Every structure is written in C-alpha cells, then in structure tokens.
Amino acid sequence: MNHVAYLEAKRTVDDRAIDRETLAAVVDGLPPNPRVLELGAGTVTMVERCYDRRLLDEGEWLAVDRCRAALQRGRDRLAERPESTVEGDRVELGSLTVRFLAEDAFASATRLAAAGESFDLLVGCAFFDLVDVDRLSTFEPLSDRLYAPITYDGVTAFSPSDPDDELVLSTYREHMETCRPGTPDGGARLCERLASIERVAPSPWVIAPPYTTDESRVVEHVLKTIEASLAELGVDATAWTNRRRGQLESGSLGYRAENVDVYGRL
C-alpha cells in the first residue's frame, strides 16, 4: 500500500482517536477568520474534520506537506464536495479557504517567517513524533499556539500476546530511536519543549475485530513497517509477522498504539 492509500485508509481510525473536547477547545480559542498553518497535512483530513463537525467555517487554512500526491488527493476530495468552489489553487468551503503547499515543513516555515507571515494556530497531526522536536523553534516566529493531535507516545501493543512480542516490539522501539528522525516518546518530548500546556488528552489508535477493509489495511501496513524496521537492524521478524498476519486474516488480532493530543504554547 502506498503512502497516500495508507493516509486515506487510516482516516476513520484517526476520527475515533482524536479527543473531541481538546479539538473543540482549540477551535474555541481562535479569533474570527483565523489563519491556520497545518504541518505535515497529508491528505488534508484535519480541516475537513473541523468543518464537518461545525467547529470551523471561516478563515484560511494553509496545508503544507512535502508529498504532493497526498495534498492533491486531499484537494480533489475537498473539491468534490457539493458546497465547495475551486478558485485557482484554492478550495473554498463556504467562507473557509483551503490552500495547499507541497514543501518540507521546516523549509516552508523558514520561508513563511522570512516573508513576515503569521498564523493564529499551528497544527501537526501525527507529525511531531516523526520530526526532531529540538527544531521546534523554527515554527516560533509563525505562531505561539500549537495543536498536535495523535502524537505517538511510545507504546505499540497487539493481542493476543505472542512469545516474541517483547523482542519484536522493543527492537521496533530501538529502530524508532536510532534510525529515523523524531522519537517514540513524541508526546512527552513535545510537552517538555512547550512554554505552557493548555490540554493533554489520550488519543489511542484502537483496531479490534470485526475490522473494516480500511482498518485491516492499516494493521497490515503496521505489521509490514515493523518487519522492515527490524530487518534494518538485522533481526528477522518473519515468523512473528506471519503469525500476526494469520490472526489478522482470521479476525482475531487486536492492535493499539498510544497517542496523545497536545495543545499548548510555544
């Protein structure tokens, strides 16, 4: 499954996970006609989520992601809505303007800050555990308010238990710590670097049988990611992965990832 297909498949998983009270508090704190900058916007589901829940119906939302195909998929989906109007490189949802920028988040932030741009809120959904939070200062010139939903916070678990779980999952964590930007303790690390915290709430991914087709595809993607990560460290997880795939196919596998929604000030 390619990156865009994975992002689309996990939309309903994200919908369940996001803490609704935190999201409502974030939007309630915005001024009229707010400007929002979303980092790592993917297929642009966050603005649609806010709009559909009648939390945000005016202002400007700039969606930034280095994957042009993901942004294009999100733009196409928004443009297909009956109430939308396409204006050049923008999609208008009533009085809410959504713009798209295919660029690295840090490069984009540096360029926008140099141009004197400012925003009422920065959003990074499932983003800040994947990047170096020590570079958070890059975003400070743009806004002092940050909302980071579904920030991974260190725990992946499957049920029923398997004899190799400890080895596989501890090695998977080692890979996250040593072989990629970011940290498996993304939520905790992010909170340490904020000037103040308004709200922190759990937002776990929970997938249990019976699965939808998309949920099954998400779990398969996670299993494939774990297997590939261990292979990079010289550990063969084929037997564990095959057992877990068999459980997924039989509808007996449960999956949980611990995340947090963080709202605070830079």
Image (tube, grey):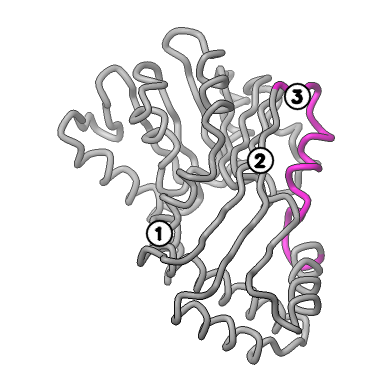
Where residue 137 sits, quadrant-wise, is: top right
- The outermost residue toward the left is 82
Where residue 7 sits, quadrant-wise, is: bottom left
Q: Could you tell me which residue is drawn at 45 percent across and 31 percent down?
A: 62
Relative to 186, residue 206 above or below = below
Q: Is residue 12 visible?
A: yes
Quadrant of the image for the C terminus? top right
Q: What segment carries the magenta color? A: 178-198
Residue designated by label 3: 197
Relative to 94, residue 3 above or below = below
Q: Which mark sits nearer the N-terminus, 3 or 1?
A: 1
Label 1, residues with CA under 10 Å away: few <14, some 14-19, many ≥20:
some
Q: Could you tell me which residue is drawn at 35 percent across and 67 percent down?
A: 213
- Name the spot of residue 149 as percent of width and height, x first: 59, 38
Residue 92 located within the stretch drawn in magenta: no
- The outermost residue toward the top is 32
Q: Amino acid at mark 1?
A: Ala
Q: Amino acid at mark 2?
A: Pro
Residue designated by label 2: 202
What separation in Å lies between label 3 and label 1 (alpha carbons)? 31 Å
Q: Could you tell me which residue is drawn at 56 percent across and 42 percent down?
A: 125
Quadrant of the image for the N terminus? bottom left
Residue designated by label 1: 9
